[in-house]
């Protein structure tokens, strides 16, 4: 697996350590979110272990309310994490757009976030970056907890 197996469609977001792109897998046409992290920056900032921890957390936390990791691979310059694409955006954008949620949606999203955190914690993972921008909305309207980049894994739990 390499980045050449994907066609980059557009930039979804950019952060301090890398960028996330919407990409299409050439072989199937399926859409994914591809997080590209520059190795040079990761090594310089001593963050390679954190990327490995993020990958491990995504694998361990797999359930209906967390974003699913499909692939991870490297190139000469980048580390890539390929996850499912949640095309409903994020909770922060939705709140900004609507101003507030209906009681029904607020109840649903809070319950789904609580279920995601309960499962993640049962696996010994502390997310450490819970915020509306990291709560993605899937095409079916359900929450997907994302961005485990700051998470901590207790290897003795779960």
Image: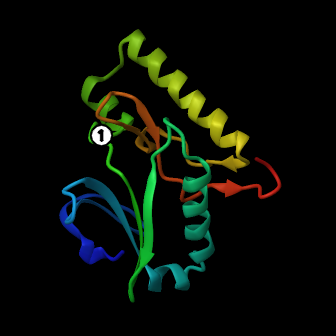
Residue 54 position, x and y percent, is 56, 61
Going by the picture, which residue comes out furthest to the bottom? 76
Going by the picture, which residue comes out furthest to the front? 27
Residue at (45, 46) in percent of width and height: 67
Quarter of the image for residue 11 reads bottom left
User: What colour-coding does the image apply?
Assistant: rainbow
**Vertical comparison of 46 with 151: above or below:** below
**Vertical comparison of 58 with 7: above or below:** above
Residue 39 position, x and y percent, is 46, 82
Quarter of the image for residue 122 reads top right
**Vertical comparison of 134 with 107: above or below:** below
Quarter of the image for residue 150 reads bottom right
Residue at (30, 40) in percent of width and height: 89
Between residue 24 and residue 136, name the one nearer to us.
24
Question: How many labels were placed on the picture?
Answer: 1
10 Å neighbourhood of mark 1: few (<14), some, or many (≥20)?
some
Residue at (28, 34) in percent of width and height: 139
Mark 1 lies on residue? 89
Residue at (21, 58) in percent of width and height: 28
Circle 1 SS class: loop
Going by the picture, which residue comes out furthest to the top? 103
Between residue 72 and residue 109, name the one nearer to us.
72
Residue 45 position, x and y percent, is 56, 79
Viewport quadrant of the N terminus:
bottom left
| Left-right relation of 36 to 45 | left
**Vertical comparison of 114 with 131: above or below:** above
Residue 6 position, x and y percent, is 24, 68
């Amino acid at each position: 697996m390499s980045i050449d197996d994907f066609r980059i469609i557009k930039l979804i977001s950019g952060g301090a350590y890398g960028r996330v792109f919407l990409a299409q897998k050439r072989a199937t046409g399926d859409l994914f979110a591809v997080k590209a992290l520059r190795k040079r920056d990761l090594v310089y900032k001593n963050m390679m272990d954190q990327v490995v921890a993020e990958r491990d957390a995504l694998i361990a936390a797999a359930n209906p309310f967390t974003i699913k990791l499909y692939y991870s691979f490297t190139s000469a310059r980048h580390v890539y994490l390929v996850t499912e694409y949640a095309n409903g955006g994020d909770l922060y954008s939705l709140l900004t757009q609507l101003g507030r949620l209906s009681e029904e949606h607020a109840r649903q999203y809070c319950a789904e976030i609580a279920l995601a955190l309960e499962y993640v914690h049962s696996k010994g993972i502390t997310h450490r970056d819970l915020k509306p921008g990291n709560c993605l909305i899937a095409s079916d309207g359900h929450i997907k907890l994302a961005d485990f980049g700051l998470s901590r894994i207790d290897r003795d739990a779960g």
